[in-house]
Image (cartoon, rainbow, N blue to C red):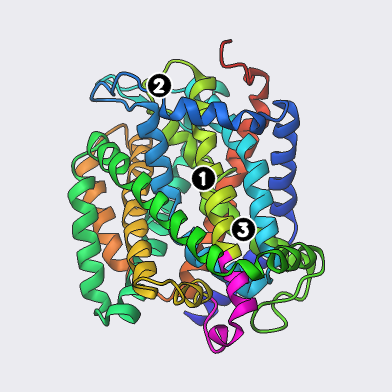
Amino acid sequence: MQSVLSFIKSANQFLWSGPLLFLLMGTHLYFTMKLRFPQKNILKAIRLSVTPEKSGDGNNLSVFATLSTTLAATLGTGNIIGVSTAVALGGPGAIFWCWITGILGMATTYAECFLSVRFRSRDKTGAYQGGPMYMWQNGLHNIAVGKFYGFLTLIAAFGVGCTTQSNSITQTTSVSFGLNPHVAGFLAALLAGLVIVGGIRSIGNVCMKIVPFLGILYTASCLLLLVLNREAFLPAVRLILSNALAPRAAIGGAAGSSLMLTARYGIARGLFTNEAGIGTAAITAAASETCHPAQQAYVSMTAVFWDTVVMCLLSGLVIVTNMLLHPESTLNVNEAGLTDAAFSFLPFLGNTFLSLCLIAFAITTLIGWSYLGEQAYCYLTGNRGIFAYKVAYIVMIYVGAVLPLNLVWECTDLINAFMVLPNVAALFLLQKYLHSNIHA
């Protein structure tokens, strides 16, 4: 196992220390300019996401349901544990790179989701199906690459979607509540499974009810902590900005000693939490009942805004202000414990509140990713054996609960890297179809 972990770390070190960082940031910048900075329309996009409309027809979802399902798949451990590990390994400056990834990544998400709606298909029941695999099949007439991306997505569903979340649940429940990992894994599989077996409407309905509430609750708690830590707010901002180009690790001195490592952990964690450039948001966007690609693209773009631009930034500021005000609380903590240390100063429930938030976020992520994996499975098998997929996914939730944390996170970075390549290639090859005019 140690040799496998070493190999994966070496692969990640190569991929994320140059090639993919330049590819992703270059893609984000390119589509930001090509689409004439669609981020400037974020307020319009937010209004579109909450504008009342007819509900889904049973096979497809409203635009708000697609947004909620996208956020379900992205909000969670990346905002809490991911930001903590980025700061611990890359230093406070990693927060800046994570935030920049979110700002610029909004344009890439817009492009992904626009093209996904533009080139989606309908199955025999009338349900829309889309994503990078259909962009390759219907837009570029290359089924082989479409199947390759679908295969990667299926692996990611069982890996990224299951293991990081269920592992985080068991890590949290064992430390906070003394619960056996096997029991925690079984309960997580049971709770998520009850929703997953109900299909897309069940997933959409649950996500619409739970995800906005969880997001507001966590954001409010971060704002409260920043008010309590207000004297360290401006020093924390200065520290983040100064360390972005002259990095220093928060713990374990050597880890964040180079700019490339700081950028690597910031961008990699930013990508993990918002998935801009991976193409998964495009799969959910295609399930929308709207006929307007630009409308859905704007709505999907807000997922990156809420996930990374807002929530990851707030988490990072809470961590750094706590490091400045209460440095003793960060001593002898592991790389995932900086957020926990900061939330210990919350006036009510403290670490228990953070633990409950993490568990709830992780379960919604398990549910959201189950749909992404299901769509990949349908593409690869022609909609055959869906129930078998759901059972396998639920079982994998339990299996992931007992995997080593280091292996889980390293595998996450590696799978993300492989998914980026075919998705970004499709964006550039189909860019002539893109526009940012919602009325066109």
Which label's residue is closer to the chain start, 3 or 2? 2
Q: Please identify the quadrant where the C terminus is shown.
A: top right
Element type at mark 3: helix
- Please state if 123 lies on the left or on the right of 216 as rendered: left
Three-letter code for the amino acid on which mark 3 is drawn: Ala
Which label's residue is closer to the chain start, 2 or 1? 2
Residue 65 on the magenta span:
no
Three-letter code for the amino acid on which mark 1 is drawn: Trp
Three-letter code for the amino acid on which mark 2 is drawn: Ser
The alpha-carbon separation of the residues under discs 2 and 1 comes to 29 Å
Identify residue for label 1.
306
Query: The magenta stretch spans which residues?
Result: 318-335
Q: Is residue 106 visible?
A: yes
Figure check: 318 above or below 335: above
Res. 268 mark:
3
Task: Tell me where residue 127 sits by quadrant.
Answer: top left
Residue 326 on the magenta span:
yes
